[in-house]
Image (tube, grey):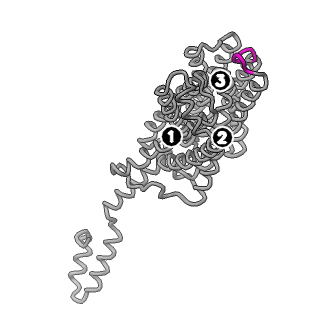
Amino acid sequence: MATTLPSAALHLASSNQNGTNYVETEIVYAQESFPNLSSFIENKEENNDKDQKSTTNKRYMPLLLLNYVLLFVGSLSASMLSKFYFIHKGSSKWVSTWVQSAGFPFLLFPIFLPVLLKYTKRKPFRDFNQKMFLFSVLVGLMLGINNLLISWGVAYLPVSTSALLLSTQLVFTLILSSLIVKQKITFTNLNCVILITISSIIIALDSSHEKAPGLTNKNYFIGFSCTIGASLLFALYLPVMEKIYQRVNCYQMVLEMQLIMEIAATVLATIGMACDGGFSDMKKEAERVFDKGTTVYWVTILSTVVTWQCCFVGTAGMVFLTSSLNGGICSTALLSINVLGGVVVYKDAFGGFKAVSTVLCIWGFCSYIFGNIKMKKNVGRKNNSGPSTELIPRRNSDEIS
């Protein structure tokens, strides 16, 4: 570092015959004044790895698009496969619950591969503490209960009916996010929530004639109630995760938390299956009950495991990159695709009431999108650095305390 000394300092040092101490002082000064360039670059790389919530980060848009794709593919595929399992005489609700979280080993690849490939210097679980771990376990247990409720709902209700009933989570999400994360209620998001909620009420009032043959009123009511309960738990999950993500600004950590949550949910489902004889029934179901054969049975199970992971990771990524309300709205809007999928694949009835309900759902989502785009433009005219809407993060990572 002595070569980086200013020429004036070297001249003064050499002109002082007894200035050995003076030269040493100047060298120390120069070392403090001219930081090591490689160290600076390393710190900048670490900041880029962590600053993934910021829209100025080059990784933000690819991550956002990736999570949209995961959410779309996961939501549609998981819904269709779950119904396929029950239609072809699969009957274990614990199996249907277990497959929703049992795909957690797949998360090990995006968590550890970047490190092995030297794409990042951040070590997995480096920023985890005891409190974060506890939160992840508790939320995972809540997801496990939510998965069970969804399984009961899908077992007793048509795909289209259960999908539209799940959209009631949106009104719960708006209320809970305003209480937990202080989500601002605007005309845009309130209008969207009202339209989608009305669409759910319409389909609920018109769905009683769609009961499967042999399904009792009691079981239909159980399926209906479980679906509403799942909506409420999912609505609670979204703002709770946004609250936790306020102290997380690295997508890797989101995947790590998701891994812990899915393990907790899988443990809960595994205990339920073991107590109910689910694993032995699973083998019997594959060999003797499932009417498409053993191979198709295990392919269905594996495919459902993968698609549910896509759905949950996409949802978590949307909450992390945007907000809980935006994640809820996107998830709910995709339910309309599930409705159309149920009609096309399984020939679910699609009468006038269901058509109106689907239109309202799509209308609500589109009004939310265009309303927020317009709001963002208006804010940009007044202040280029103004606050973001729900479609993009409301804070950058350097604003997180």
Q: Is residue 135 above or below residue 94?
A: below
Residue under the image location 56 percent in, 23 percent down = 84
Q: In terms of secondary structure, where does tag 2 sit? A: loop
User: Splitting the image into 4 quarters, where does residue 335 fall?
Assistant: top right
Question: Outermost residue, top direction?
Answer: 352
Report the mark closest to the observer, 3 or 2. Answer: 2
17 displayed left or right of 147? left
Closer to the camera in the image, 376 or 152 = 152
What residue would you read off at disc 2?
276
Decide whether residue 174 is among the magenta residues: no
Q: Say which label, 1 or 3, has the lower sequence index.
A: 1
List x then y, in percent, for residue 374: 58, 28
* Other residues around mark 1 within 10 Å, as few (<14) / some (14–19) / many (≥20): many
- Look at the magenta stretch and give its main secondary structure: loop
Contact between labelled residues 3 and 1, with CB atoms less than 8 Å apart: no
Q: Look at the image and tell me whether residue 362 can be seen.
A: yes
Report the amino acid beneath label 2. Answer: Asp
The part of the chain drawn in magenta is 208-215
Question: Circle 3 — which element?
Answer: helix
Residue nearest the observer in this picture, 26 or 338: 338
Q: Secondary structure at mark 1?
A: loop
Q: Which residue is mark 3?
A: 364
Residue density around tag 2, few if under 14, some if 14–19, many if 20 or more, within 10 Å:
few
* Residue at 64% in and 18% down: 358
